[in-house]
Image (cartoon, grey):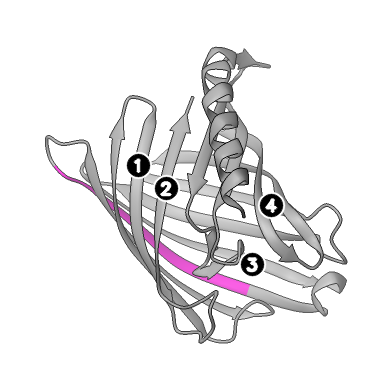
Amino acid sequence: MTLKKIILNLLCLTVLLPAIGQAQTRLLGGELAFNASLLSDYRFRGVSKSNNDVAVQGGIDWFADNGIYTGAWASNVSNFRGADVETNFYAGYSRESHGIIYDIGATAYVYPGGNNATYFETYGSAGVDFGLLTSTLGISYMPSQSNNGSQDNIYLYNETRAQVPNTPFSLNFHLGYEDGFFGNNKWDWRLGTSVTFDKFELGISYVDTNVVGRRSDSGVVFRVAAFF
């Protein structure tokens, strides 16, 4: 992505974020929420989808009081099977019971203009909130599909977040294992920190995998995000 495009994307975010904040509302008995992010690199399970370049992302979510939710999200990517945009459409159910937060659902990965690029994946997780520390174990499973060589894929992960007491800072750790169409005994890990103020978050993370290649080598990712 060129410097000109980066500047234009920043200007677009500056203009759109106030409007997004005003647009937050209740709809059909649920709450609408919006998010927007600018990253120095779009790493998905440790591997860059933006060719180690800048990514602009945004999404919209709808949460019902009974735990049902749905949403859509988009990001630029670098020539994923001929596509330069990734869109995710997902729906699921999340509830807390006896101190454990459960989440199950499915995601459709759609790449407009791509060649046999669309696929879907199911997911589930269970997390515990200890107040200053939250930790989640999850699994994502892609059933065998013709667009992906009739091969399935499984991804197991842990996501842990620790809040630094009496500060807006938090520490984040991620460890994932993938095997199947998208990975062959692949490990990825991420260690980072972030600071939150009002509706904004700034973060920096170190990301790496056990896969050799420019897109999967170790790197530092910077992120600025807004939530409304």
User: Which amino acid, by three-letter code, is at mark 3?
Assistant: Tyr
- Foreground mark, 1 or 4? 1
Q: Is residue 99 magenta?
A: no
- The picture places residue 76, in percent across and down from the top left corner, at 66, 51
How many numbered circles does the render carry?
Answer: 4
Which residue matches tag 3? 141
The numbered mark, 4 or 2, whose residue comes first in the sequence reads 4
Q: Position of residue 189 (x, y in %)?
A: 39, 70
Type of amino acid under label 1: Leu
Instruction: For marks 3 and 1, give the CA distance.
Output: 30 Å
The residue pinned by badge 2 equals 223
Mark 2 vs 1: CB contact within 8 A: yes
Residue 177, x across and y down, in percent: 48, 76
Q: Which residues are magenta?
A: 154-164
Mark 3 packing: few (<14 Cα in 10 Å), some, or many (20+)?
Answer: some
**Do labels 4 and 2 touch, CB within 8 Å?**
no
Give the alpha-carbon distance from disc 3 to disc 4, as whole Å. Answer: 10 Å
What number is the disc on residue 107? 4
Considering the numbered disc 3 on the image, is that residue within a helix, a strand or a loop? strand
- Which quarter of the picture shows residue 179? bottom right
Q: Residue furthest front?
A: 4
In the figure, 175 relative to 35: above or below?
below
Q: Is residue 7 found left or right of 96 in the rendered image?
A: right
Residue 66 in sight in this render: no
Q: Position of residue 16 (x, y in %)?
A: 58, 24
Identify the residue position indicated by label 1 in the image: 202
